[in-house]
């Protein structure tokens, strides 16, 4: 098929000149209309566009008119819509300008102030404006109140709150509601798990032992420690508190068989830790398990930062496994001492 769109009947071509550096294209009408955007010099304009297409390719041929003028004329963009006999689909698209091939890129509009804003994006902006007027730790209005105030559906509101939760702007508490995220805390990884900078905002930080028991190693603990599943390990768990509220969890697992190699003195754990020759650490984003979420008084969708450390002796034998789980919306890690 050959189609010619004429803009200037009887126009005379006056030379070739340099082809455009690139062309942009997009489709409309379910792929049956090809939209081409061509940046070119102001003293040139498009005279004709012809389209030749078959089952495998589409060729767009642009014929220009050159108007006498300064070669340094500024660039302008021309846009043309060209109907196709069949949807473009996966066919190869080629464009020429006065016979010279023009590199093509698919257009992906960046949007702007005039772009249509989704209800969820509008809700996020309204929520951020509200958050900026509240103190850290303050409760947001209920879902019903926010839905009515913003005039959006509750499902859309939940989506916006989910995104703000992941961004660390708000946090959810189980059965309580949504709260403005609290101040960030500078944290350091230590042999015991986590150390909070005493100059960080907040007071009353410390820890509470929530587990100190001998248990059977599960599959993951056994794999990390190089022992058999159901081998006995000492499990020590601590709940970290900031402003007297749950902030994170530290969980240590030590094989009983290897701990038995210590002299058995009251300082056995410290002596055992001193055998560490190196530490393998990995850090990743995570979520809390149901049990961890209950201890931390958080929703399971709350973003958490988890790091796993395996302490090894000078023979690369795993000595202990430490997992630290902390609220991702409040942590700023200091790795300068690592």
Image (cartoon, rainbow, N blue to C red):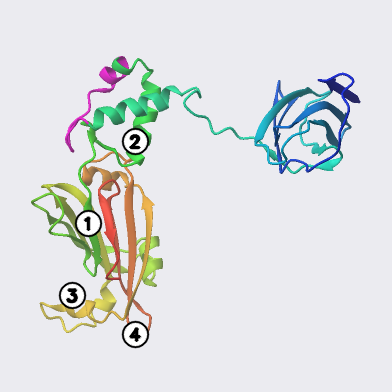
Residue 156 image point, x, y percent: 40, 23
Q: Quadrant of residue 277?
A: bottom left
Q: Label 3, on which residue? A: 269
In this rendering, the answer to whether 177 lies above or below 208 is: above
Which residue is at the front of the view, 17 or 55?
A: 17
Which residue is at the front of the view, 269 or 280?
A: 280
Q: Label 1, on which residue? A: 186
Quarter containing the N terminus = top right
In this rendering, the answer to whether 58 lies above or below 33 is: below
Indicate yes or no whether the magenta region holds residue 146. yes
Mark 4 or mark 2, whichever is nearer to me = 2
The first of marks 2 and 3 along the sequence is 2
Q: Label 2, on which residue? A: 164
Q: Quadrant of residue 263?
A: bottom left
| Region rendered in magenta | 133-148
Q: Residues within 10 Å of mark 3 (few under 14, many from 20)?
A: few
Instruction: Give the total number of marks visible in the rendering.
Output: 4
Mark 2 or mark 3, whichever is nearer to me = 2
**287 to the left or right of 70:** left
Mark 1 or mark 3, whichever is nearer to me = 1
């Amino acid at each position: 098929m050959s189609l010619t769109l004429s803009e200037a009947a009887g126009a005379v071509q006056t030379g070739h000149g340099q082809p455009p550096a690139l062309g942009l294209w997009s489709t409309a009408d379910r792929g049956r209309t090809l939209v081409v955007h061509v940046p070119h010099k102001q003293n040139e304009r498009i005279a004709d566009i012809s389209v030749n297409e078959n089952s495998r390719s589409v060729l767009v041929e642009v014929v220009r008119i050159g108007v006498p003028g300064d070669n340094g004329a500024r660039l302008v963009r021309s846009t043309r819509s060209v109907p196709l006999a069949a949807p473009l689909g996966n066919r190869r698209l080629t464009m020429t300008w006065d016979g010279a091939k023009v590199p093509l890129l698919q257009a992906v509009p960046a949007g702007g102030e005039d772009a249509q804003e989704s209800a969820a994006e509008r809700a996020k902006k309204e929520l951020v404006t509200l958050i900026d007027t509240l103190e850290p730790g303050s409760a947001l209005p209920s879902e019903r109140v926010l839905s009515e105030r913003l005039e959006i559906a509750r499902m859309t509101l939940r989506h916006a709150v989910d995104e703000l939760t992941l961004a660390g702007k708000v946090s959810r508490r189980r059965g309580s509601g949504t709260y403005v995220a609290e101040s960030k805390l500078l944290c350091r990884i230590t042999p015991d798990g986590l150390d909070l900078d005493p100059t960080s905002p907040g007071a009353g930080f410390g820890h509470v032992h929530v587990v100190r028991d001998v248990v059977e190693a599960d599959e993951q603990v056994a794999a990390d420690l190089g022992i058999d599943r159901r081998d006995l390990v000492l499990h020590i768990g601590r709940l970290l508190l900031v402003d007297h509220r749950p902030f994170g969890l530290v969980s240590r697992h030590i094989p009983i068989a290897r701990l038995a190699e210590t002299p058995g003195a009251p300082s056995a754990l410290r002596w055992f830790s001193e055998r560490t020759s190196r530490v393998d650490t990995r850090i990743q984003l995570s979520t809390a398990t149901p049990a961890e979420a209950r201890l931390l008084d958080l929703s399971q969708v709350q973003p958490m930062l988890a790091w796993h450390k395996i302490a090894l002796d000078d023979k690369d034998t795993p000595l202990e496994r430490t997992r630290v789980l902390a609220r991702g919306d409040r942590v700023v890690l200091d790795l300068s001492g690592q």
